Image (cartoon, grey):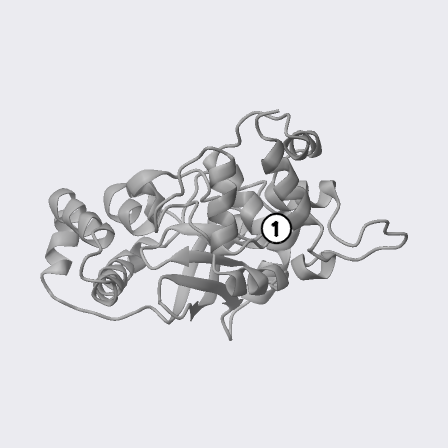
């Protein structure tokens, strides 16, 4: 079987993870010290049958997105993640892609944030992973590829990306995004081309971005108060807080109800509604 070693590696990594490490209950009568196959499948968003075939080495070649999901579910290190791509005959995704390796500490924190919307993004606003409440509040960002994976890129090139924000807030959001992008680009290595390529693309396609870029504002977004126009619940006011990784390349965002509003009750309702009323992805 072509992927027998891949299956053996998955089994070995599954066996070392305790349920509590990934936010799952231990449960009674547990026969294995690590995770069960169905638990890994649940965490990776795969069917149990598909994951079982992968462990048997009899499955088809997993996609780049599935490998990334498995690496996160099994809490692989960056070296282990790269090895998993090698076993699957897939190229390791470059920095900034939606399949980029998530900082393990941030992933652990995200797992424990079960009662508030939270997600991990890159410094160029590519969403790497979301918890269920973030999907319910902001939409599912997992389907975007290429330049469109960056919410900043979509904000300045796709009008639909703005519809979750009240129109009165669009100008302020645009200014904040541009200042944040300039700060992120400045923090990167001089040889890095990813941020420069994105900036050049936006300068050539968005007159609004070009005008704001010419103002030379620079500031990371560390704390924000946002008004989000949810299609089912109406206007929800939240505080958006950021936790930065040491190199600044990744951020854990979590959303709390704004003081003095009824947003706490609305976020509680959001947990009940889930994603049933969400259509187009946005943030």
Q: Is residue 40 left or right of residue 146?
A: right
Q: Which residue is mark 1?
A: 74
- The reply to whether residue 65 is in sight is no
SS assignment at label 1: loop
For this orientation, the residue located farthest to the bottom is: 259
Q: Is residue 10 left or right of residue 152?
A: right
Q: Is residue 253 left or right of residue 207?
A: right
Whole-percent x, y for residue 164 in the image: 40, 50
- The reply to whether residue 204 is in sight is yes
Whole-percent x, y for residue 265 in the image: 61, 63
Viewer-proximal residue, 183 or 212? 183
Number of labelled discs? 1
Whole-percent x, y for residue 274 in the image: 61, 47
Whole-percent x, y for residue 51 in the image: 66, 34
Q: Quarter of the image for the N terminus: give it.
A: top right
For this orientation, the residue located farthest to the right is: 29
Viewer-proximal residue, 120 or 96? 96
Residue at 37 percent of width and 71 percent of height: 222
User: Is 225 above or below relative to 102?
Assistant: below
Task: Characterize the local packing of mark 1: few (<14), some (14-19) or many (20 or more) Cα atoms within 10 angstroms.
Answer: many
Q: Quadrant of residue 157?
A: top left
Q: Quadrant of residue 179?
A: bottom left
Q: Quadrant of residue 40?
A: top right
User: Is 255 above or below relative to 65?
Assistant: below
Residue at 44 percent of width and 38 percent of height: 143
């Amino acid at each position: 079987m072509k992927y027998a070693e891949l299956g053996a590696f998955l089994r070995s990594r599954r066996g070392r993870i305790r349920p509590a490490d990934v936010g799952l209950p231990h449960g009674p009568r547990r026969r294995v010290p690590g995770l069960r196959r169905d638990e890994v499948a649940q965490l990776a968003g795969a069917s149990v049958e598909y994951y079982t075939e992968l462990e048997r080495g009899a499955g088809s070649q997993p996609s780049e997105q599935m490998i990334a999901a498995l690496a996160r579910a099994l809490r692989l290190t960056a070296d282990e993640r790269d090895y998993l791509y090698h076993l699957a005959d897939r190229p390791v995704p470059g920095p900034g892609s939606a399949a980029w390796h998530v900082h393990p500490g941030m992933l652990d924190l995200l797992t424990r944030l079960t009662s508030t919307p939270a997600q991990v993004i890159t410094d160029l606003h590519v969403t790497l992973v979301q918890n269920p409440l973030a999907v319910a509040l902001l939409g599912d960002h997992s389907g975007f590829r290429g330049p469109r994976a960056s919410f900043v890129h979509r904000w300045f090139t796709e009008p639909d990306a703005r519809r979750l924000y009240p129109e009165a807030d669009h100008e302020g959001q645009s200014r904040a995004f541009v200042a944040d992008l300039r700060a992120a680009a400045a923090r990167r290595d001089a040889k890095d081309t990813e941020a420069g390529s994105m900036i050049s693309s936006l300068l050539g396609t968005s007159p609004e971005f070009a005008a704001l870029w010419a103002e030379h504002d620079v500031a990371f977004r560390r704390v924000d108060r946002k008004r989000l126009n949810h299609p089912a619940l109406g206007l929800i006011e939240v505080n958006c807080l950021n936790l930065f990784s040491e190199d600044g390349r990744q951020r854990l965002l979590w959303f709390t109800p704004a003081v003095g509003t009824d947003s706490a009750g609305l976020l509680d309702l959001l947990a009940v509604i889930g994603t049933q009323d969400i259509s187009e992805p946005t943030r």
